[in-house]
Image: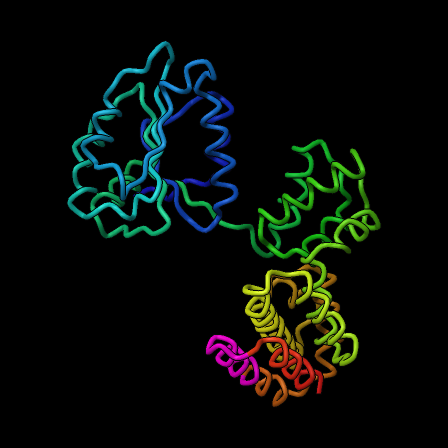
Amino acid sequence: MPDDRSPEDLLRTLQKGRLDPVYLFYGPGEFLMERILDRIKALVPEGTRELNLEIVYGGETGPDKILEHARTLPFLAERRLIIVRRTETLSAEGLARFLPYFQNPSPSTCLIFVASRTDFAKSFFKTLRSQGWAVKFEEPGGGNVVPWILQTASEMGLKISHQAAAYLHDVVGTNTRELHGELEKLSLRFGGKVGIEEVKESVRNSRIYTIFELTNRISSRNRSASILVLNRFLEEEDKRDAPLRVIGMLNRQIRLLWHAKLLAEKGSDMREVMQKLGITYNVAGQLLKQIKLWKNRELEHAFGLLYQADGRIKSGARPKPILENLVLSLCG
């Protein structure tokens, strides 16, 4: 059985103007998925796009109607494009209706199924995979993030240094949508070439930088600075989502500290910490300094504090005093 295709492999075939008759797009990399869908839509001539491009939803359009349109010849164009979103909402019986079509798909139609959940035990998904039509979209992780930033910047006509790309990764993380947004801001503000100082200046006023600064201040156990950054973040963010976003980011940071401390105690060097935790050189260096300020029992206690704060916020208690007490307790 073939492996699922990668977005990079699909892009290479798109550059040659080739499309398979059927695809399954799935996986957590939604931003990259939407970018490739836009590339495929552009293959349908703009003048005939209204007649040859359809976007339907699994919970709203039945399989028989989708199949009827898939078998319809394109109008004044080489191909029709049908994108079926929310494929996972179709019933098992509905999905099975497509199986005969997969045996002899229309060569003039590209039928793309987009699913947020897949079950490859089912014949529908198993057939798409066996035909080599399944494309898995992942968010870049670990050592792949900085190369993704460099490649994406290059595609935008932006030249960014490796050091600046690593810093952007440190601040923003691995979310490709947010990384792309920051690269767009850099391109608009500074033009064709940026270094680390331009990146620092650009992200310093963003909400992403504020939460990054907060986790660093707490990891360094700086109480007064942590409270100041927390209050600034809560003022700038959506009042409903900000508290749980803080809990989530702190949970991630404490886990990084915990794993870095365990690795350091086993004698791991910075390169090994980078590889095993999927972080950059700068972040690994910061963690190895910060773990000296934490005892193992304090990190264990931190997980308990985060769990309690999360429960109290979700139960309807006022989030600001809970988060302030949490930050003070974590800083010790």
Query: In this orientation, does residue 276 appear?
Result: no
Q: Residue at x 81, y 38 (%)?
A: 190
- Residue 63: image location, x then y, percent: 21, 36
Residue 160 position (above or below residue 175): above
In the rendered image, the residue lying farthest to the top is 76
In the rendered image, the residue lying farthest to the right is 197
Main SS category, magenta section: helix
Tell me: 68 left or right of 176: left
Q: Nearer the viewer, residue 130 or 64?
A: 64
Residue 263 position (above or below residue 236): below
- Residue 332: image location, x then y, percent: 71, 87
Q: Residue at x 64, y 75 (%)?
A: 257
Q: Residue at x 69, y 84 (%)?
A: 328
Q: How many marks?
A: 0
Residue 276 position (above or below residue 299): above
Is 97 one of the magenta-colored residues? no
Q: Nearer the viewer, residue 196 or 271?
A: 196
Tell me: 72 left or right of 146: left
Q: Residue at x 62, y 87 (%)?
A: 296
Tell me: 167 left or right of 97: right
- Residue 309: image location, x then y, percent: 55, 80
Tell me: 120 left or right of 292: left
Quadrant assignment, res 300: bottom right
- Residue 270: image location, x then y, percent: 71, 68
Query: In this orientation, does residue 140 appear?
Result: yes
Residue 90 position (above or below residue 258): above
Stretch in magenta: 304-317
